[in-house]
């Protein structure tokens, strides 16, 4: 009998409205810098007027059981935890970006600049700094600086250092306190559900028992922990509209 | 300190590795986690979203008193612990380094970006107060309080305005007020059409973007959540909209309607219902004036005070309301030598020609689709059926319509009436699963007032209230601006002198923006109360008073999701930043300088219902917290405002069906007769003509909605496209584009254009294009440029632009592109019969560079 949960996520594509509230709550929760989105919601358009179809696909890190990114990390900064979370030790990462190349889902972001310069405002300005108590950004989350897991590595939050890679952590700093990842908690239509796939009573398990599901790029053999119900995977006809592409 | 791989590398002197490391390192501060010495105190305090319309409950997570993130408050029925991207990103607005940090006094001339000196609150309040006082003494109506959004209706819109005795203008003419007027006039409640989503089975998203926009009474988050639940319960969604985008995902069908033709479609649907015989006769006979007899002059006939009907039992004419009579809906009779017909008969003849084939020509929707929808409406309505809700048996007519901002079009008032008549034909207004207008079915004063307007001869006030131009008048600042700039044509006798601008940005948000700017030049003194230097402030404010964002007390406001009763008060998660203050505090101080403090306190007592021990003493000074504390105690909450500081929201009981559904109130529908036939509209038309009003103003004052060619369709053919505007979920009006978290998410302005149309014009994705609008009445043109965005989600003859841009004062929003409000017009043909703005215009597009 395992003590450790086997975490996974179920995303209901029938419910998602493409609001991108999850992208935003992830960003605030994890202090990711400008232009960097760990959770990403695709807005898709298919077909032609008047038969236009529009749909949405949230895509967090898939926290694969057979993660290509873990395989290629030369220094062991990217590793798979027992509970399934694929984590990045930002102290160990050397920024080689092999994980970025290896990942077929494109979930990795590289920190090109000093985070202080890429956090949306001049928090050090004379009249601003006292009001925000000298923190950068003003909403800096100190939970992200602490070590996590039995392994006690620095794996939470983004934008800590220039020159390292980061990605969705399934909000390890929240999950270890029995909270849902920020994206899951925030979704206004409960399209995202997180929990223990080994617990038959968990919401994720119950949904998967009840409804057919698919995973992205199953043929790649990555064994994602993210399952989708409703909707369908993107096809050759699917076009991305309204990409969230920031200029940094 | 711990020796880590990094510090080891830094110290080795091994060239390659050291260089790499020093390029990457920030230094020992990266290990600040290990060095965090002080204990961290974490807490969660309630507050409420300040950006949107429905005041979603927020729990602010604080670390040692510093707000670090905002989560939804699970207790708030509207958002149930979740937030839209704006609510989450609001944290950047709270801390925005570009907030106005102290009161500002202008040092240069107006009409150009301002140069300012920072002043003390004392000086700024004294200056603003003295100017307001001067003009109040002259004529209080020359002081105008202009709100965009008000989040403390009782305090600002009522108590403050009454204490000042000033003129009050809102933003409704740019929102959905044409719909409000139609519903108030026809049925009585103050709202526009919204579905009873819990029970609806056929939902029409009529110009409603279900995944990105507002809607009546509520907004994002609540409506989409309820819609999804309705769909999961088997409801069908039909979208009637020139542009579909997000709603597509949930729609069972899309009817891509030509802009501005909703009235024609509604009449055609009425035609189908009549032809198919799916008519709720009982409702029409019992609760409406549909059986009332109309004379040859088009007016309802009266005998003394009574309207008349034909009693089917006897075939004779009797007063309406005669006990036991069964009023006829069809046929004709003779009365005093004239032919009289029930209004319903007049209506049936009126829509004889409004066939689906006729409407197909006008709307661009296929004839068969209109027949199909009409039949589906008639069948789904289940006329005659009932359902038990919370122990009360009520009529069940599960056809719900959400139509809101779409009513701001040239024929808006009558289009809303036509849609309402369609729903009245099937008895769905106020029914379970049908269409409602307000959370509680209550009759607004306007039900009577809009039927009893006395049209004056002038001179008129700048809003042209009770004038021969706009007898029914939503109060449109752009109309006022137009009238001030052309006082002879509009017979304006008064010119506002002082403007207090509250959470509004008229020179960006109110089309046409050039007209607004010109009118603002004529004001003597402008006070802008805002957390940011809005464009209105930048160009025209004499004084800017910095308002707080969410760090203040505001309310009380409903937190109901329309099924559960709840009330909220916004409480601050931290003290106001910089020198900002909550507006209630500002007004408590400003009214003192003006000399109306005691009156303000007395009106606060009245509006907030404060009495006995909880009444405010006009002789005492209060903080805003104390005002709300008194209110909370008056509600019976022992902890006073502490209740809201702890919980954020006070959830009460489910709203009983006897307050939600018109059929269930006591008496039903508030005891008022539904104006199927708008007799007074005809009367107003006659008076307007008599007083010499030009046809453009009186032509739509007809007792039944009547289609006509739209003004914009008389623009020359080279203006071959319709421009419509829409909302992005990432933004709210003009108050978010400068929040970098949101503008990075949304990108800037774009012109949505159908790929087939784009190809024909040689326009490719992302290419900069000029959009030029044309005023068919004056010949004026206006143009802006933005990148093209090719999408199949719009009709080939439509282009669409979101609202939220055109902001130039805040460095974060300067490069996001223009607002479509620079393209829409105001004035004849571009405002409706009720002075409501039209967000439609014909445009042409050409690639930049030709």
Image (tube, coloured by chain):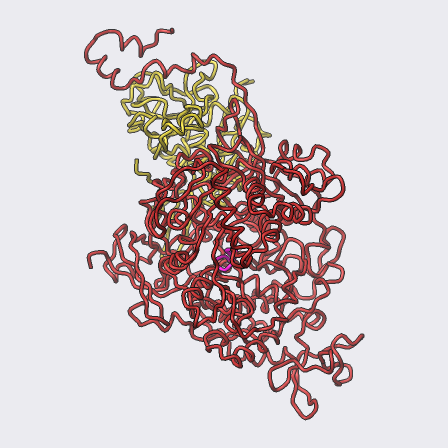
Whole-percent x, y for residue B456 in the image: 56, 73
Q: Residue at x 51, y 31 (%)?
A: A194
Magenta-span inclusion, residue B549: no
In the rendered image, residue B171 lying in the magenta stretch gets the answer yes
Position of residue B570 measured from the top left corner of the image (x, y, whole percent): 58, 39
Indicate left or right for B216 with B749 as reference.
right
Q: Is residue B632 visible?
A: yes
Q: Nearer the viewer, residue B773 or B696?
A: B696
Q: Which image quarter: residue A179?
A: top right
In front here: A194 or B47? Answer: B47
Q: Which residues are magenta?
A: B170-175
Q: Quadrant of residue B711?
A: bottom left
Task: Give residue B824's position: percent from left, percent from top.
Answer: 38, 61
Q: Which colour represents chain A?
A: yellow
Q: Nearer the viewer, residue B35 or A43?
A: B35
Q: Is residue B233 left or right of residue B748?
A: right
Q: Is residue A240 visible?
A: no
Chain B pictured colour: red
- Asked if B344 appears above or below B407 in the picture, the reply is below
Above or below, comparing residue B28 to residue B462 in the picture: above
Which residue is located at x 38 percent, y 6 percent? B1
Q: How many marks?
A: 0
- Locate the C terminus of chain B by quadrant: bottom left
Horizontal and vertical percent for residue B682?
Answer: 57, 77
């Amino acid at each position: 009998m395992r003590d450790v949960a086997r975490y996974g996520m179920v995303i209901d594509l029938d419910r998602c409205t493409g609001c991108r509230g999850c992208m935003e709550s992830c960003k605030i929760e994890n202090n990711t810098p400008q232009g960097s989105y760990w959770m990403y919601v695709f807005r898709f358009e298919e077909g032609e007027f008047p038969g236009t179809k529009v749909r949405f696909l949230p895509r967090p890190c898939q926290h694969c059981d057979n993660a290509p990114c873990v395989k290629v990390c030369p220094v062991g900064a990217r590793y798979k935890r027992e509970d399934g979370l694929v984590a990045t030790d930002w102290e160990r990462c050397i920024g080689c970006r092999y994980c970025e190349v290896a990942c077929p889902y494109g979930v990795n972001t590289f920190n090109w600049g000093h985070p202080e310069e890429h956090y949306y405002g001049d928090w050090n300005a004379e009249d601003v700094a006292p009001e925000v108590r000298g923190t950068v950004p003003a909403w800096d989350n100190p939970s992200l600086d602490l070590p996590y897991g039995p392994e006690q590595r620095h794996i939470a939050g983004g934008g800590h250092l220039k020159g390292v890679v980061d990605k969705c952590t399934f909000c390890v700093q929240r999950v270890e306190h029995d909270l849902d990842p920020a994206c899951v908690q925030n979704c206004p239509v409960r399209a995202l559900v997180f929990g223990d796939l080994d617990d038959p009573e968990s919401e994720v398990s119950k949904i998967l028992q009840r409804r057919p599901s698919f995973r992205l790029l199953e043929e790649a053999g990555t064994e994602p922990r993210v399952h989708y119900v409703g909707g369908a995977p993107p096809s050759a006809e699917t076009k991305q509209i309204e990409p969230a592409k920031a200029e940094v | 300190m711990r020796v880590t791989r990094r510090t080891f590398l830094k110290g080795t002197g091994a060239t390659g590795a050291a260089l790499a490391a020093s390029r990457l390192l920030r230094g020992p501060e990266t290990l600040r986690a290990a060095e965090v010495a002080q204990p961290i105190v974490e807490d969660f305090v309630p507050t409420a979203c300040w950006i949107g319309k429905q005041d979603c409950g927020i729990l602010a997570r604080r670390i040692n008193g510093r707000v670090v993130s905002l989560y939804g408050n699970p207790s708030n029925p509207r958002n149930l612990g979740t937030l839209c991207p704006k609510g989450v990103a609001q944290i950047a607005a709270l801390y925005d380094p570009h907030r106005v940090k102290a009161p500002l006094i202008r040092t240069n001339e107006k009409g150009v970006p301002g140069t300012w000196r920072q002043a003390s609150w004392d000086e700024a309040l004294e200056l603003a107060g003295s100017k307001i006082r001067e003009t109040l003494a002259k004529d209080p109506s020359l002081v105008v309080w202009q709100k965009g959004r008000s989040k403390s209706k009782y305090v600002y819109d009522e108590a403050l305005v009454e204490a000042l005795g000033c003129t009050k203008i809102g933003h409704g003419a740019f929102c959905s007020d044409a719909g409000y007027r139609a519903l108030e006039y026809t049925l009585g409640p103050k709202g526009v059409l919204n579905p009873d989503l819990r029970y609806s089975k056929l939902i029409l998203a009529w110009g409603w973007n279900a995944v990105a926009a507002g809607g009546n009474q509520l907004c994002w988050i609540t409506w989409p959540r309820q819609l999804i639940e309705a769909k999961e319960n088997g409801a069908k969604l039909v979208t009637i909209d020139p542009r579909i985008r997000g709603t597509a995902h949930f729609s069972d069908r899309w009817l891509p309607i030509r802009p501005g033709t909703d009235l024609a479609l509604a009449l055609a649907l009425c035609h189908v219902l009549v032809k198919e015989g799916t008519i709720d006769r009982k409702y029409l006979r019992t609760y409406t004036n549909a059986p009332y007899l109309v004379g040859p002059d088009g007016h309802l006939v009266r005998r003394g005070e009574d309207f008349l009907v034909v009693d089917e039992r006897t075939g004779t004419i009797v007063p309406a309301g005669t006990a036991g009579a069964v009023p006829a809906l069809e046929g004709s009779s003779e009365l005093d030598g004239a032919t009289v017909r029930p209004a319903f008969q007049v209506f049936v003849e009126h829509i004889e020609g409004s066939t689906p084939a006729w409407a197909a020509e006008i709307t661009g929707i296929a004839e068969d689709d209109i027949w199909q929808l009409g039949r589906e409406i008639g069948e789904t309505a289940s006329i005659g059926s009932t359902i038990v809700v919370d122990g009360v048996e009520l009529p069940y007519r599960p056809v719900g319509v959400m139509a809101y901002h779409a009513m701001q079009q040239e024929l808006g008032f009558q289009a809303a009436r036509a849609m309402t008549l369609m729903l009245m034909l099937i008895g769905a207004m106020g029914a379970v699963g049908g269409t409602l207008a307000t959370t509680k079915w209550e009759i607004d004063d306007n039900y009577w007032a809009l039927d009893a307007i006395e049209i004056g001869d002038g001179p008129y006030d700048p809003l042209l209230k009770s004038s021969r131009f706009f007898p029914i008048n939503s109060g449109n600042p752009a109309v006022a601006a137009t009238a001030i700039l052309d006082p002879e044509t509009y017979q304006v006798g008064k010119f506002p002198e002082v403007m207090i601008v509250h959470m509004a940005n008229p020179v960006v948000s109110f089309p046409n923006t050039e007209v607004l700017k010109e009118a603002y030049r004529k004001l003597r003194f402008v006070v802008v109360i805002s957390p940011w230097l809005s464009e209105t402030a930048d160009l025209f404010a004499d004084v800017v008073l910095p308002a707080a964002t969410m760090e203040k007390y505001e309310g009380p406001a409903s937190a109901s999701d329309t099924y559960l009763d709840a009330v909220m008060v916004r409480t601050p998660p931290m003290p106001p930043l910089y020198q900002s203050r909550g507006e209630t505090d500002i007004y408590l101080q400003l009214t003192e300088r003006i000399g109306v403090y005691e009156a303000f306190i007395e009106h606060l007592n009245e509006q907030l219902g404060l009495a006995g021990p909880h009444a405010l003493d006009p002789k005492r000074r209060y903080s805003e917290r104390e005002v709300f504390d008194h209110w909370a105690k008056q509600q019976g909450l022992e902890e006073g405002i502490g209740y809201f500081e702890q919980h954020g929201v006070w959830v009460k009981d489910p709203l009983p069906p006897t307050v939600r559904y018109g059929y269930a109130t006591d008496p039903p529908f508030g005891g008022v007769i539904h104006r199927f036939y708008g007799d007074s509209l005809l009367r107003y038309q006659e008076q307007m003509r008599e007083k010499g009003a030009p046809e453009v103003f009186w032509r739509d004052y007809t007792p039944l909605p009547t289609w006509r060619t739209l003004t914009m369709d008389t623009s020359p053919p080279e203006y071959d496209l319709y421009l419509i505007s829409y909302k992005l979920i990432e933004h709210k009006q003009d108050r978010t584009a400068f929040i970098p978290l949101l503008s990075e998410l949304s990108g800037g302005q774009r012109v949505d254009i159908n790929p087939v149309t784009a190809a024909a014009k040689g326009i490719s994705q992302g290419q900069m294009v000029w959009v030029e609008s044309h005023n068919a009445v004056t010949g004026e043109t206006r143009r802006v440029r933005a990148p093209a965005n090719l999408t199949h989600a719009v009709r080939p003859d439509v282009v669409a632009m979101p609202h939220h841009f055109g902001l130039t004062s805040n460095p974060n929003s300067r490069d996001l592109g223009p607002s479509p409000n620079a393209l829409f017009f105001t004035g004849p043909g571009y405002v409706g019969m009720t002075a409501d703005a039209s967000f439609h215009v014909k445009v042409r597009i050409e690639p930049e560079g030709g």
